[in-house]
Amino acid sequence: PPEAGGGGGEPLTLHLLGACVAAAVEEDRLAGAGRPAQRTPAWLPLLYCHFRLATGAGSMLPLPRSALPHCLLRIAELIELEGAEEEDSPAAAPATASAAEAAVEVFCTLLLASPGWGEGELSGVLPPLRRRIRSSPAPRGGAAGGAAAARALCAALVACSGVAAELDRSELDADVAAVLDTLRAAPAEARAALCSEGARLATSWHGEHALGRPSLELVEAVRAFVTAAEGADALRLAASLLRGPCGPHMAPLAPALRRLLELRRPLRESMRAPDAHELLDVLSALAALQPAPMGAPMAVELLVGCAASSEGGRRSAYSLFGAHCANGAALPHLSLEQAAEVAGGGAESLLDPARLESLDWLRASHARELVRSFPVDMLLPAEPAGCGGEPLSASAPLEGGEAVARADAAEGPRPDALGSLLVLRCLLRHGRCDAPRWISKGAAGLLVVGLSAASPSARSLAYEAVAALMAVLRNGPSFRERPHVVRLLRSLQDAITKPNLRVPSLWSVFVAHGLAILAQPHHPQYKALNNYILTRAFFDLSDVPMFFHCFHSGSSTPRDDRLWMLALLSHGLRAEEDARLCGGRHVLELLLGFSDSSLADPPARRACLAVLLRASGTADGASALLSKHGILAWLRMQLCASPLSSPLLELVALLAALVRSPPFASLAAATHAEAGRALCDAIAAARAVRRGRGDAAAGGGDGGDDDRG
């Protein structure tokens, strides 16, 4: 086969090789038991070559279905014989393991090529594989050859899933236990493939039937494997076992398993490890089996780890919190010392209560970034989908109306949203709140944005903190902006008609940035915002705040008003409810028309694209854009313009988001063809940029982002 792994075989070559394989297999089958046992059947290398040349495609299988059981049996016997040779001659173990791996590749390909196996067809295949992985001690059975045999056994058991009722449950329990024991001692290079097959077995229909009443031997094997799991692949398999049919029978052991994992791998250090996501997934599975209140020490370890973790690790930590809060358990209360540890990110020199109270740990830029990208799906029991960061942020910040979006890396890592909420609640409980400082630093706005969280536990935390903040505003020292701030918060409070209501993100972001504006009397939106608040007894949460006041502004600075509103929309359009609010006011149609008008300069077009990209991240928004507003035809018009009136990167990102959205799959073939034509236009535009004819177009006409375009 070619060194690159196949794919270069000519049809005639494959046909001739397939004929040779079929003839050799038929000769071997007819000889039957009268032929002496061979270490390697003559047809196995030919069959392996055929698979390599044909890239393992099942449609190019050269054998009839009637010959497949014989091939599988001979390969299983070969794996058993090689295992015996490996034990008798350890020096030959590497070569034996390599041959076993090749045999297993052929074995698994044969199984996948012809689904619907019956127990009778594979009855002779299982015993040799079982003997191979059960007969050796754990260290020897965990060698590469033993791992290959265990992988073949898993594949065979998954193939038998349709006839699981005909198989012996005790044998199946022993099979899974032996596979797990083999996995614990398997070399790293063989562990990934075996873990993948084990996960398929654990979650298959066969697994549901056979593991429904696991034996004590199997429960002990699962317990030992979970507590000793190392590496991302093993941890993923451990989570599959705990979430599979065997999981409910592990519930009494869940607290002990959790303690063992936490003792073996402290959470603070584990959050920085490459497999942090998988470890927290295992802990979440254990918490789902037997929910238990999360103590403050464990919460501090997780929150400190979140400060230095990746986005995936942070989402997994939120999922773990959500699993513990699934039965209504409240989030833990922190002491001032614990709050300082969380706010300081676990640094050696922890913040003292005075520095904690001054909010030196929460920079205003960090608070604004948390408001713009607040993880509304945090603390849901299941890991949130599509919460992996911002696809594109609006280019116009809410303050100042400038068309600039930048992240200051010199300010250090962004603090954790949940940790910040818990620290701020702790300060409010201890009466350590300087209201003017909280408003100017953005802490008050962060609490308000928490009212839009999807999790009831997160909303309860935010409601408790906002109520305490309003009590401080009523009873605390007066300051110049206090009447306006109280009126803004009371207008939101009076609009909430039932306990723990989820406030639309458009409104919570509006109020959060309204608080920051009210602290700056010279802000361009100060007068308009005050007029909007004073003319309403309470906010109408079924409307889009200040949209027509700003988008069709009659002030002396209409451009800044529009940029401010577009940025507000791009930051606040987070959930289905927000998309429905925009649909009621025809926001998306107006943006599509405005983007093509002479009033739209490059910063305004970029801001419109940011809103459209946000809308495409929701099912209602994507459906409206695709089926009602002709977004694909609009994209083609933008991509075919010369020069491009909008940045190429943002246009392609919007096209990708629309194609990935769930509503796209249910649309007619004509829509799919239109998306394909838009992609062709994007490729042509990219080629033009590469040839140097679209330098200005790559920056969207404003002279920037040439490399990104």
Image (cartoon, helix red, strand yellow):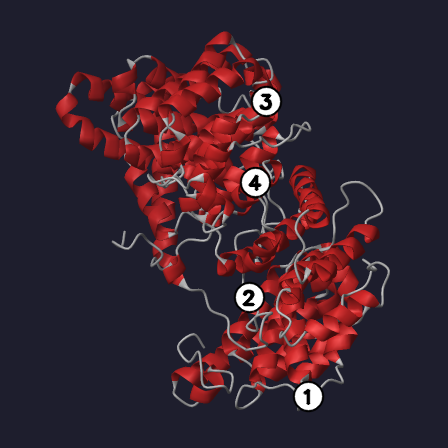
Residue drawn where x is 42% and y is 35% of the image: 108
Indicate the quadrant where residue 212 lies.
Answer: top right
Disc with the residue nearer the chain's start (4 vs 1): 4
Residue assigned mark 1: 597
Residue 551 lies, in percent from the top left, at: 73, 78
Disc 4 to disc 2: CB gap under 8 Å: no
Label 2 is placed on what type of residue? Ser
Above or below, comparing residue 555 to residue 649 in the picture: below
**What SS does tag 3 mark?**
loop
Numbered badge on residue 427: 4
Q: Nearer the viewer, mark 3 or mark 1?
A: 3
Disc 3 to disc 2: CB gap under 8 Å: no
Residue assigned mark 2: 393
Mark 1 crowd level (few <14, some 14–19, many ≥20, 10 Å Cα): few
**What SS does tag 4 mark?**
helix
Above or below, comparing residue 505 to residue 674 in the picture: above
Label 2 – label 1 distance at C-alpha: 22 Å
Label 4 – label 3 distance at C-alpha: 26 Å
Q: 103 or 94, which lies in front?
A: 94
Above or below, comparing residue 508 to residue 593 in the picture: above
Residue 161 lies, in percent from the top left, at: 57, 27
